[in-house]
């Protein structure tokens, strides 16, 4: 039996939390389109297309520029091929030593068990303050 889209997304968050990028990328379509929130520091290369671009432009930066960065989902809304997750980002930006504690909403689109699109929504003003000091 195949996994539900909700299970795929929940498993993706768990894989991210344990640092298993390969498992996260394994559920992405090769042509996945990823948007960071407008005005978020990592929106500078929107849209990211494909797992390699997401890995380099988003995940690598999160892993090297932050201490203890966490994505903690608290609620999931299952609409079939669309999954919405809400929660909080926490961590400390290394260059400034400032911590973030921001709400997020993630809009996931899936087709045939693969993520085809992602849109982030978050407190971009807080993120910019944390990054810029």
Image (spheres, grey):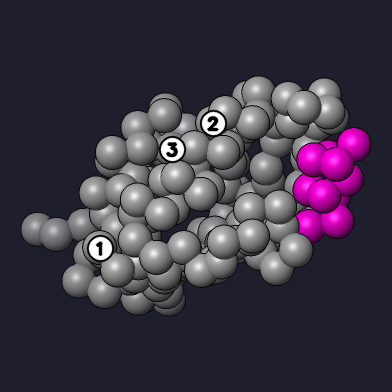
Mark drawn on residue 66: none
> Mark 1, residues whose alpha carbon is within 10 Å: few (<14), some, or many (≥20)?
some
Q: Position of residue 75 (x, y in %)?
A: 57, 55
Quadrant (top left/top right/bottom left/bottom right) for the C terminus: top right
The residue sitting at 57% across, 61% down in the picture is 45
How many numbered discs sit on the rendered protein? 3
How far across and down, in percent of the image, does residue 73 sit?
A: 57, 47
Q: Nearer the viewer, mark 3 or mark 1?
A: 1
Q: Which residues are magenta?
A: 124-133
Disc 2 crowd, CA 10 A, few/some/many (<14, 14-19, 20+)? few
Q: Is residue 64 left or right of residue 32?
A: right
Residue 85, quarter of picture? bottom right
The answer to if 128 sits in the magenta stretch is yes
Pointer 3: residues within 10 angstroms few (<14), some, or many (20+)?
Answer: some
Residue in view at x 24 percent, y 49 percent: 26
Rendered image: mark on residue 30: 1
Q: Which residue is mark 3?
A: 16
Which residue shows up at 28% across the image and 41% down it?
23
Query: Which element is circle 1 on?
Result: strand
Disc 1 from disc 2: Cα separation: 22 Å
13 in the magenta segment: no
Q: Residue furthest left?
A: 1
Is label 2 in a helix, a strand or a loop? helix
Residue annotated with mark 2: 63
Residue 40 against residue 13 in the figure, above or below? below
């Amino acid at each position: 039996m195949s996994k539900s889209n909700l299970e795929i997304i929940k498993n993706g968050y768990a894989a991210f939390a344990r640092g298993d990028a390969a498992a996260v990328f394994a559920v992405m379509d090769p042509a996945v389109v990823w948007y960071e929130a407008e005005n978020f520091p990592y929106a500078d290369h929107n849209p990211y297309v494909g797992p390699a671009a997401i890995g380099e432009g988003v995940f690598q930066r999160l892993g090297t520029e932050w201490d203890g960065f966490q994505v903690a989902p608290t609620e999931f809304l299952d609409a079939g091929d669309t999954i919405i997750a809400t929660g909080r980002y926490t961590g400390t930006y290394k260059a400034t030593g400032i911590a973030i504690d921001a709400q997020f909403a993630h809009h996931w689109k899936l087709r045939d068990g693969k993520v085809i699109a992602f849109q982030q929504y978050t407190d971009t003003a807080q993120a910019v303050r944390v990054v810029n000091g």
